[in-house]
Amino acid sequence: MMARKILIDCDPGTDDAIALFMALGDPRLDVRLVTVAGGNVGLAHTLRNARALVGLTGKAVPVVAGAERPLLGSFEDAAYVHGEDGLAGVLLPEGPAAASGIAADAIREALRAAGPAGLTLVGIGPATNLALALATEPGLLPNVAEIVLMTGAWGEGNVTPAAEFNAWSDPEALAVVLGCGRPVTLATLEVTAQALATPSRIEALSRGGTGACREAACAILAGTPPSRRLGGAGSPQHDSCAIAWLLAPEAFTVREVFAEVDCGPGPGRGQTLIDRWGRLGKPANALVLETLEAGRFFEVLEQSLSRLP
Ligand code: RIB
Ligand code: CA
């Protein structure tokens, strides 16, 4: 079966790192491009981290720098979760140089080259780069097969009571992507909470084999503080859920929903309003991932790590 062509827009970020390993370690995904934004930490760090992570896998995938800040509003990082360097203090060898150009242009070129429904966009950071690409050249939208975003929550947020970090970081960009008319799949905090990296699961991954990527992944997982919001049992692997959807859709249950994001200035800014029960009577514009078989998720991660150097 032909590998599925994807690009990954990210802000590494400890959980972004695991998502990159999961994707780059599975031959069913053909990662054409990795684009980077500021998010968990500033762009200087997220770009260095993305280059180092891709470099560690040995895969010849171009890494292109993008937005340092959101479309509107100010930039605020999440270094309190990911560490000042963005990878929980885990030092990796310098990766290959970033490819020239900027992310929004590289995304458009990748879409142009992919042809009709030829490329899946995976967004696991603030959606700024994706929004800029799609808004700049809407004629390329038919080449988008699917957009899979780790973003939002139908309940409590993780950066404000109302908002999840990626949605909160650039709600206007998320609104552009939600409104683009192409299939959008949402991995929200509710499903990512079911992919909890507990000490026993990290230990199992560590025992699963050897290799620089596995060692880096386990060190990053072990260095990530457990989530207080989830009772301190482990760290939710947010971004990998977007990749796992592409690799093991059978591990999820889903629901078609109408979803929108609050772009107002108030305490609800960045809140994703996800209408799971159709109360608003508006046509569905997204698929939300609701449940996840955690055992299958960690099997997929184990398989990817076993294929990486
Ligand atoms: O809220 C979790 C999301 O914000 C993840 O993508 C994490 O990496 C941060 O970017
Ligand atoms: Ca991220």
Image: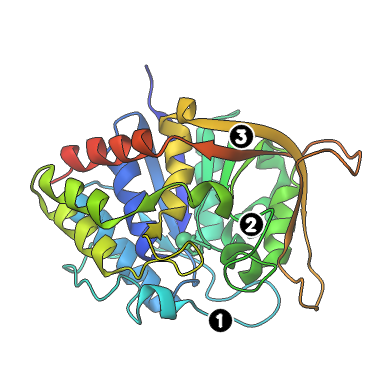
According to the picture, the residue beneath numbered tag 1 turns out to be 76
Measured in 3D between alpha carbons, the distance from the residue under mark 1 to the one under mark 3, in whole angstroms, is 32 Å
Circle 2 crowding by C-alpha within 10 Å: few under 14, some 14–19, many from 20:
many
Picture mark count: 3
According to the picture, the residue beneath numbered tag 3 turns out to be 143
- State the SS at label 2: loop
Indicate the amino acid at tag 3. Asn
Circle 1 crowding by C-alpha within 10 Å: few under 14, some 14–19, many from 20:
some
- Which residue sits at x=41%, y=31%? 247
Q: Position of residue 73 (x, y in %)?
A: 69, 80
Circle 3 crowding by C-alpha within 10 Å: few under 14, some 14–19, many from 20:
many
- State the SS at label 3: helix
Q: Does mark 3 have its CB less than 8 Å from ligand 2? A: no
Position of 12 with respect to 38 (left or right) is left
Foreground: 303 or 206?
Answer: 206
According to the picture, the residue beneath numbered tag 2 turns out to be 152
First of labels 1, 3 by sequence position: 1
In the rendered structure, find residue 135 and report the number of the disc placed on it: none
First of labels 3, 2 by sequence position: 3
Q: Which of the 4 image quadrants contains residue 189?
A: bottom right
First of labels 2, 1 by sequence position: 1
Relative to residue 278, is residue 40 depicted above or below?
A: below
Foreground: 231 or 107?
Answer: 231
- Which residue sits at x=19%, y=68%? 92
Indicate the amino acid at tag 1. Glu
Indicate the amino acid at tag 2. Gly
Measured in 3D between alpha carbons, the distance from the residue under mark 3 to the one under mark 2, in whole angstroms, is 25 Å
Q: Position of residue 272 (x, y in %)?
A: 72, 57
User: Can residue 229 be seen in the rendering of this structure?
Assistant: yes
Measured in 3D between alpha carbons, the distance from the residue under mark 2 to the one under mark 1, in whole angstroms, is 17 Å
